[in-house]
Each structure stands twice: as structure tokens, then as C-alpha cells.
Amino acid sequence: MPTAIAIRQIEGKPGQVWYPLDRIDVPSTTPSATQVTVRISAAALNHRDVFLRQHLYPGTTFGVPLLADGAGLVTATGSDPSARRWAGKRVILNPGTGWKDSPEGPESPRGYAILGGTKFNPVGTLAEEVTVEAGELEEAPTHLSAVEAAALPLTGLTAWRAVVTKSGNAAQGRNILVTGIGGGVALMALLFATAKGANVYVSSGSEEKLRKAKELGAKGGVNYKEEGWETKLAAMLPAGSQLDAIIDGAGGDVVSFGAKLLKQGGVIVSYGMTLGPKMPFLMSAVLKNIDIRGSTMGSRKEFADMVAFVNEKNLKPVISRVVSGIDNFDAIDGLFEDMKNGTQFGKLVVEIAKEGESSKL
């Protein structure tokens, strides 16, 4: 019987509890006509997985496999041609369901159901195998290893929607600030915006992360812990120009410094608020006609567009650390600690099965 990793309930208040990892057995499922079974090669963490272990994420559920990012090999298919075409292919999974192609948001009346760890979707990728609808797959880019492919879905989709769909500034010569560089979404935002021809600047509290970001194509970087960092960033911009957009996952005082750095009519795209659930909108931003646009993960169409762009530009997600083995609890716990402490630069990945090895299932 296939193995998966979930969380186990213990006593504790949301935000104070840290649910332990729990090995569970998941019955093998025969694909329906339009489904496929994927033997997972690798799965990757996201911030939501830390929130699940702290009971800070909506719908947190015990006994449901964790993680939304996964790549693997199709080992069985249903009878429909739409499923049979995937037989034997290397694939990555769309990390959520219920959102086809609307630019506004999910069409499903039940909302968007992200994979991993909640009552809204029974599938999670920290598992030896999953069975999903064939329409939720994309072929894994051939230039990516299984580990790299597993690192792409959720952060790639979130960054794509923020940079390309929502900012309106993924274009040659535009000036974009990506805050909090080092996390998976921020790094993919840097890669996408740079590949689109934008001048990308980054911020971080770590000089080492700033250095690495410049190696990946950032035009410059500033340490937000330094007094006067806004002035330093403004001096880095091309003469006479200001920022066109800010891609932000922290919230906090982004509107305050954005009002100083953005051009008239500039855009702040917020895909998260890790500093807290409130972000004041100031009159200084109103007077500059600044837009704040919330951005979540993205539609099935945006997922396909993102993967096609990764293929076209030969982009590779940045990997921070990889551990091997679904039963390697201590090592997997270490990845969660990296994520919780914010020490990673790039994605944290669990290699579940080596590519090309025979399945033990």
C-alpha cells in the first residue's frame, strides 16, 4: 500500500501548536476514465505547509497527505483518450483545482482547492502515488530534473500571476522591485520579470541573499534593515525613472515606501502578508494614483502559460535544499524548520523516488 505523510493531531492552540508528521497508508486507487495515477518522484514545500502544522491555515485536516508541489511519472491511466495520452510521461501537477481560465478568480462555487493537508482536496504530493484528473497535468519540462520540476508548480504559478497577469509591467525596460528575495515566489518573480526584459531590483535582510539574487539577474539589491534603503534603491534606478511595480509578499509598510518609490499610477501586487493581516493604504499613495492588486495562485490556463514560458526560456527554479526518502522524518522536519525560520534561498524539496528506479509499490 502506498505511503504518504500527513500531520497528526496533538493538543495546542493555533499558532502555538506544531503538529508532528505522521506516516499514513493510502489505498491504491484505480483511475476512472479521465484520471491518471502518478508515481511521485519529488515534492516541494511552501509556506502554507508551515501554517498547516501551526493550525493557521483554513481547513487544516489530519490524515490528508501534505504538500501541493509534485512531479512524477504516469504509471496508470483511465480508458478515455484524454487520459491514455499521458501513459509513461514525466509530469508536474497543477497545484489546485476549481479555476479554469477566468482572469478574475476561481469559477467553482466551492472555491479554489489547493492540494495538500486540508479538507478541501484529498490529494497531497508528499506521497508515493496520487490519482488525479488528466486535465490537471502538464509535461515536466525536459530541461528540468524531477527535483527541479517539483519545485515549479505553486511558486511558479503564484509568481506568474503576480508578475505577468496582475502587475501589467512584465515588459522590456520596466523597473520592478521584488521584496523578500529568497523565498520561492520571489525568486520565480525575479526569473520571470528578468526573462521578460524588465529591470528587477530586490530587497532582503540578508546580504548573502542579495548577492545570490544579483547572480540570478537582479540589477541591484537593498537591505531593508538599513536606514535610508529607499534612497539607496532610488539611486540605482535608470536616470530620471521610478519603479513601475512592486511585487510583494510581506505587506506591512509596503504602501508607505511604495508611495515614495513608485511612479504616478504605479502598481503594488500583494500575494501575501507575512508581516501581518493588515496593510494600511495611505493618502500619499492615493495622491499618486497607486494601485494595490491582490493576487493569489492562478488558473489552469495561467499554469499552462507559465510552464510554456519556462520551456521557452529554459528557466530553472532555484533549489535551496533536497532531502531523500519519504520515511526520512528528521530530514523532512529540517526542511520545515528552514521554511519556518526563513533561512532558505529557493525551494525545499523531498526526493521521494529516484528518476528511473523501479517502483516498490
Image: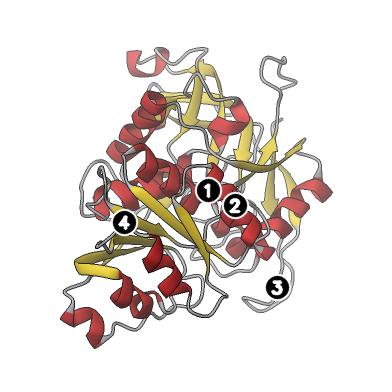
- Pointer 3 residue: 17
| Marks 3 and 2, the one that precedes in the sequence | 3
Kindly state the secondary structure of the residue where label 2 is placed: helix
Q: CA distance from mark 4 to mark 1?
A: 17 Å
Residue 254 in the image: above or below residue 199: below
Q: CA distance from mark 1 to mark 2?
A: 5 Å
Kindly state the secondary structure of the residue where label 3 is placed: loop
Residue 186 in percent (x, y) is at 47, 53
Badge 1 amino acid: Lys
* Colour pattern of the rendering: secondary structure
Instruction: Kindly indicate whether the residue at mark 2 contacts the one at mark 3 (C-beta within 8 angstroms).
Output: no
Whether residue 31 appears in this view of the structure is no
Badge 4 amino acid: Pro
The image's mark for residue 214 is 1
Q: CA distance from mark 3 to mark 1?
A: 37 Å
| Marks 2 and 4, the one that precedes in the sequence | 2
Instruction: Kindly indicate whether the residue at mark 4 contacts the one at mark 3 (C-beta within 8 angstroms).
Output: no
Where, by quadrant of the figure, is residue 235 drawn? bottom left
Badge 3 amino acid: Val
Nearer the camera: disc 3 or disc 2? 2
Q: Residues within 10 Å of mark 4 (few under 14, many from 20)?
A: few
The image's mark for residue 211 is 2
| Marks 4 and 1, the one that precedes in the sequence | 1
Nearer the camera: disc 4 or disc 1? 4
Kindly state the secondary structure of the residue where label 1 is placed: helix
Residue 173 in percent (x, y) is at 26, 46
Badge 2 amino acid: Arg
Which residue is depicted at the point 25% across and 61% down?
Answer: 241
- Pointer 4 residue: 238
Q: CA distance from mark 3 to mark 2?
A: 35 Å
Nearer the camera: disc 2 or disc 4? 4
| Marks 3 and 1, the one that precedes in the sequence | 3
